[in-house]
Image (cartoon, rainbow, N blue to C red):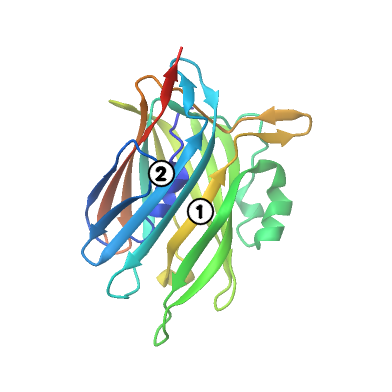
Amino acid sequence: MRKYVMLVLGLLALSSVAAVGIATAAGGEGPVSVEIGTLKLTAGGGFTPKVLSKTKQTPIALKVEGSVKESDGTHPPAIREVDIEFDKGGEVHLKGIPPCKEGKIEATDTAAARKACGPSLIGEGEAIAQVALPEQPPVNVKTTVLVFSGGEKGGKAVMFVHGFFSSPVSGAIVTTVTITKHKNGRYGTLAVAKIPQITGGSGSITSFHLEIFKSVKVGSKTYNPLSASCYDGKLKAHVLGIFEDGTKADLEIIRACTPKG
């Protein structure tokens, strides 16, 4: 099952884009910004190691971060779906990692989710959601984000992204990401993330940082959730965000790598 490792970047970094637009991230490692009307989206991150085999998969760790800001101070709308095409040079390896079942984490706080599906944990970080309730000023709520393997079956791979929000609102949000093969030029995999509403649609993710681990231990065995090869000096991903009001936004990300061998 092949897929490039910018999955969580695409899933979260577009969570509040409010209009149609395209941004391209060059091969550098600095943050990339796009402005659409009054909104500014900034995304960044990278993977290690940078030196990768041209033909063989090398385990990697991934760090991603992003933020969204409205220059006029208004509350950004929420995203409901993210579709991501991944470079053929990247892969995800979930076999061997015990799969988490969504029902175990869908109504749990962070500690309970970690306890229920700890062996399935492949990444974690933090996110901030802005909640705008009627006749009240927007409030920022922080949450720990956990990424669990949902396993592979029938040609599909599944990941669950869990976040728990407390005061002034309380509840768990679990985003299901389904990954399938997808031959489209440079791309080889399609991931579709279905994002539930936060507080009935009044909440939007406005910033985050996250790491997908290079390795995880299950008993005496070690597994590498992510790997990549570098056949032409870059890895690429295309992200399409679909929002609650029906608008769409495109983000193209390119990161440099060093081919070896």
Q: Earlier in the sequence, mark 1 or mark 2?
A: 2
Residue 227 on image: x %, y %: 52, 28
Q: Residue at x 42, y 19 (%)?
A: 259
Q: Nearer the viewer, residue 60 or 201?
A: 60
- Disc number lying in front (1 or 2): 1
Q: Amino acid at mark 1?
A: His
Q: Secondary structure at mark 2?
A: strand
Q: Residue at x 73, y 34 (%)?
A: 218
Residue 32 on image: x %, y %: 33, 49
Q: Quadrant of residue 80?
A: bottom left
Q: Amino acid at mark 2?
A: Val
Q: Which residue is mark 2?
A: 192
Q: Which residue is mark 1?
A: 209
Q: Residue at x 59, y 72 (%)?
A: 166
Position of 121 with respect to 4 (left or right) is right
Disc 1: CA contacts within 10 A as few (<14), some (14-19) or many (>=20): many
Q: Which mark is residue 97?
A: none
Disc 2: CA contacts within 10 A as few (<14), some (14-19) or many (>=20): many
